[in-house]
Image (cartoon, coloured by chain):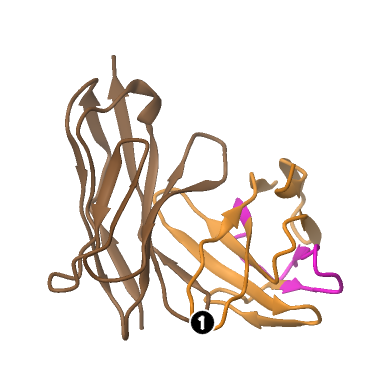
Amino acid sequence: DGGITQSPKYLFRKEGQNVTLSCEQNLNHDAMYWYRQDPGQGLRLIYYSQIVNDFQKGDIAEGYSVSREKKESFPLTVTSAQKNPTAFYLCASSIKSAGKANEQFFGPGTRLTVL
Amino acid sequence: GNSVTQMEGPVTLSEEAFLTINCTYTATGYPSLFWYVQYPGEGLQLLLKATKADDKGSNKGFEATYRKETTSFHLEKGSVQVSDSAVYFCALSDNDYKLSFGAGTTVTVRA
């Protein structure tokens, strides 16, 4: 089945450690996205990538880094510089059609807790 | 910039009640509008969408109409079920592929 997988589902990290969240899609989508979700808030965009080897900062990129070496993969690293990393992280992807806004497909999410 | 404002929750209803969740937006140009649903512990799923003024999106008994004159995209369902309990997000997207989300509305349906 086509879809987006995120791993792990739950992740615990000690303060001061970097951690990488995985996101893989087999939908052949060009664009991929990382969002952060906090209780009572909407989703906030961290980074997005429209094509391999290229990515742009979203609204809250500080303390995060990404790479896009393959079309199907878009890992997110939460660095020790992120001041409040405990949150639910969602990865998404979409096709890329010029001049058209397309729906995004979401993975099941990773819940990160900093101890 | 783009922004979405949706009705604050939580909303608690009895089965078979009528549900409305208000959503208004601010955008330059002509965005596409979406409603996403998030069930507990899961990612978001697209519920319905509309890409131009006066379009009506519908799915699973839910409906929303793109109203350009009032910059609104209110979600409605005539008779809710317990399985409709979830968080509902209104969102918009212009042509740069990014989605702007509202804060989400938690809906609980009691049997």
**Looking at this view, is A29 or B39 the one in front?**
A29
What's the residue at 67%, 78% (across, down)? A50
Q: Is residue A11 above or below residue A98?
A: above
What's the residue at 55%, 73% (across, down)? A60
- Letter of the chain in brown: B
Residue B78 % position (x, y): 19, 33
Bounds of the magenta span? A65-90
Q: Is residue B52 visible?
A: yes
Q: Is residue A86 visible?
A: no
Q: Is residue A79 left or right of residue A46?
A: right
- Letter of the chain in orange: A
What's the residue at 50%, 34% (across, down)? B40
Q: Is residue B97 above or below residue A110?
A: below
Q: Amino acid at mark 1?
A: Asp
Residue B48 % position (x, y): 39, 51
Magenta stretch: dominant secondary structure: loop
Residue lying farthest to the left in this orientation: B69
What's the residue at 40%, 25% (across, down)? B83
Residue A32 % position (x, y): 67, 67
Q: Is residue A89 left or right of residue A59?
A: right
Q: Which residue is mark 1?
A: B96
Residue lying farthest to the top in this orientation: B111
